[in-house]
Amino acid sequence: MLAKLTTKNQITLPREVVKGFKGIEYFDAVVQDGRIVLEPVRIRPVAADLAGIRKKMERLGVVAEDVVEAIQWSRSSPK
């Protein structure tokens, strides 16, 4: 099946391809071995409170120093 790349860099996927992904609106796109690979993503809200954010950071292995480095990096990047 062909998928067309438009002039706006959008890809139209055939109905037969996406019909197995009911309820999925987002796909994570990566390049692997010269191929575009799409993986379905379900968006789930993070607990809005500080405890929920800290719990997720701990689960992901993010420590305070990582946050400090990220802030420094973002502030030094050319805009």
Image: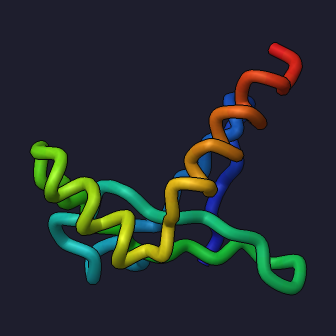
Identified at 70% across, 38% down, the residue is 9
Depth check: 67 or 35 in front? Answer: 67
Residue, x 79% and y 81% (percent of image)? 32
Residue 37 vertical position relative to residue 5 in the rendered view, above or below: below
Q: How is the image coloured?
A: rainbow
Q: Quadrant of residue 48?
A: top left
Could you say which is closer to the camera, residue 6 or residue 72?
72
x then y, percent, for residue 35: 79, 78
Report the residue that reaches farthest toward the front.
65
User: For the N terminus, which image quadrant?
Assistant: bottom right
Q: Is residue 79 above or below residue 74?
A: above
- The quadrant in which residue 29 appears is bottom right
Q: Is residue 53 left or right of residue 8?
A: left
Depth order, front residue of 20/53: 53
Q: Residue 51, position in %: x, y?
A: 15, 55
- In the image, taking residue 4 as reference, residue 64 lies left or right, namely left
Q: Nearer the viewer, residue 44 or 68?
A: 68
